[in-house]
Amino acid sequence: MLVRTRPAAEGPRGPLALAAVEHERDLPAIKHVGEVGKTYYRRRAEAEGFDDTAFVDRRGRMSEATIWNLAFWDGEAEAVVWPDAPMLVGTTMGIVRRQLEAMGVPQIVQEVTPEGVADLSGAVVMNSWTPGVEVRRLGAVALPDAAEFVALLHEAYRAEPLTTP
């Protein structure tokens, strides 16, 4: 047996540029190993000058990224927009959603297309590393600064009690 120790990994700080590719994970609602597509599409995106990849299903809807959930900010309605597509709902996403609700922040679940991202006011990715890393480009679409959105998601995450009553 070989045991290797090292400091905990830290995710990227952003802002990120994500390629958008058509891909659907097998059994997306279940976390499992053996998903070669995630690594393949991330490496392909990096070779094309992107940081990572966001997935678009066969109906043209954004779902998630390789190891991330996606969230968007609709500055007009001041609501968090969650993609309406099959995906793995991550633990961090669940925490953030629960605490945003407690904070009274509106949340919408709707279909988001790569073209429709241009109509939104910001985008982030989240996973167990972080409740929000800013995305500044999705495919060819440049996105506005989302620092306030990122701060809101981090605030929501920090509001989660460390223990349950």
Image: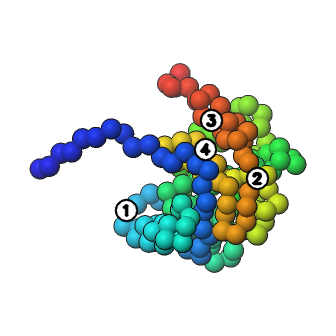
Q: Which residue occupies 44% across, 72% down?
A: 40
Which of 165/129 is in front? 129
- Say the numbered circle drawn on residue 70: none
In this figure, which residue is indicated by the disc labeled 4? 132
In this figure, which residue is indicated by the disc labeled 1? 33
Q: Residue furthest bottom?
A: 58
In this figure, which residue is indicated by the disc labeled 3? 154
Q: Nearer the viewer, mark 2 or mark 3?
A: 2
Q: CA distance from mark 2 to mark 3?
A: 18 Å
Disc with the residue nearer the chain's start (3 vs 4): 4
**Amino acid beneath label 4:** Gly
In this figure, which residue is indicated by the disc labeled 2? 144
Q: Which residue occupies 49% across, 57% down?
A: 67
**Amino acid beneath label 2:** Pro
**Amino acid beneath label 3:** His
The local crowd at label 1, few if under 14, some if 14 to 19, many if 20 or more residues have their Cα within 10 Å, is few
